[in-house]
Image (tube, helix red, strand yellow):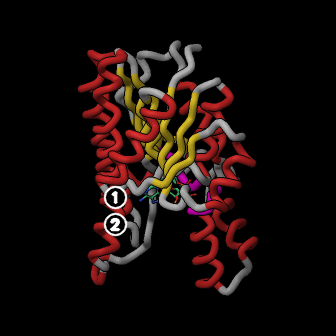
Amino acid sequence: MKPRVAIITGGTTGIGLACAEALLARGHRVAIGARRAGEAGVQAEMARLLGPGVRVAALDVADRASVDGFFQGVRDSLGEPTILVNAAGIYQEAFLHDHDEDAWLDQIEINLTGSFRMTRAVFGGMIAAGWGRIANIASTAGTRGERGYAAYCASKAGLIGLSKATAVEGAPHGISCIAVSPTWVETPMMGKAFDRIAAAQGITREAARATLAGSNPQGRIVQPGEIAALVDFFCLDAAPGFTNVDVQINAGADW
Ligand SMILES: NC(=O)c1ccc[n+]([C@@H]2O[C@H](COP(=O)([O-])OP(=O)(O)OC[C@H]3O[C@@H](n4cnc5c(N)ncnc54)[C@H](OP(=O)(O)O)[C@@H]3O)[C@@H](O)[C@H]2O)c1
């Protein structure tokens, strides 16, 4: 397998971190970007988890200048990126009738427009290389509605649409793009849901975790490595036809 340069947004925790581990194990050169990735503590933790060869730099996908600066830094230090994993994301629960507009805009900006900005940054280099892989971490929320998640659902539905358009536009250039849509995955993001359920029901965090695990048909919570395994397969030279799909990793759940 030819070593490539891979950018992983949101690679400091959760699903992005698992993807970084998988792509590093394949011998790729990995660059991770997140808002707090420039902090000394985060840098040290990343070096401890992933080794010193990984580029870890501040990136805010909601800020065009930050995206451009991050991309240029990766290109100058590691070379032209031909793998992109858009894992940066946020969610904030709110009901529609009094939905805070900033909360709506933040989720659209980071989850959807941020992925567009990153895709636009890498696309020209991928066309020139005649090879590219873009994995957008969407969600089952992109194809199913849920009360209290309007902005998140809308952002992920948009991301699935962006993925399909990217796949079609990239196909003649050897660029593949998929959306990967998990159900709940055990990450710091899901920890917020544990806390909310625990507070609402007056139960412990462990009991809240058990409630969510029990609500899944497989009776368990999906782990980040399951998402990374799919992204790893997608990035293989052996899988050029795997594109233009939204792949759910749902353990049997609709949401
Ligand atoms: N966990 C789940 O249940 C689940 C299910 C389906 C889909 N997903 C999706 O999977 C992706 C990863 O989620 P996760 O569960 O791994 O979440 P997580 O552990 O909270 O990680 C989110 C990552 O995104 C980064 N990030 C957030 N805003 C950013 C921004 N503006 N610019 C750059 N980086 C930013 C965070 O770092 P900083 O805070 O330092 O920026 C962090 O590295 C998200 O898109 C999420 O929507 C998650």
| Residues in magenta, as a range | 181-189
Count of numbered circles on the image: 2
* Point 43% across, 22% down: residue: 242
Residue 156 visible in the picture: no
| 136 part of magenta stretch | no
Q: Is residue 113 above or below residue 98?
A: above
Near mark 1 (Cα within 10 A), the count class, few <14, some 14-19 or many ≥20, is many
* Point 44% across, 33% down: residue: 76
Residue 248 as seen in the image, left or right of residue 100: right
Near mark 2 (Cα within 10 A), the count class, few <14, some 14-19 or many ≥20, is many
Disc 1 marks a residue whose amino acid type is Ala
Q: Which residue is mark 2?
A: 106
For the residue with label 1, is its CB less than 8 Å from the closest atom of ligand 1?
yes
Q: Which residue is mark 1?
A: 62
For the residue with label 2, is its CB less than 8 Å from the closest atom of ligand 1?
no
Q: Position of residue 108 (x, y in %)?
A: 31, 60
Q: Earlier in the sequence, mark 1 or mark 2?
A: 1
Q: Position of residue 1 (x, y in %)?
A: 59, 14
* Point 62% across, 84% down: residue: 199
- Pick whichever, 185 or 70, lies toward us: 70
Residue contact at pointers 1 and 2, CB within 8 angstroms: yes
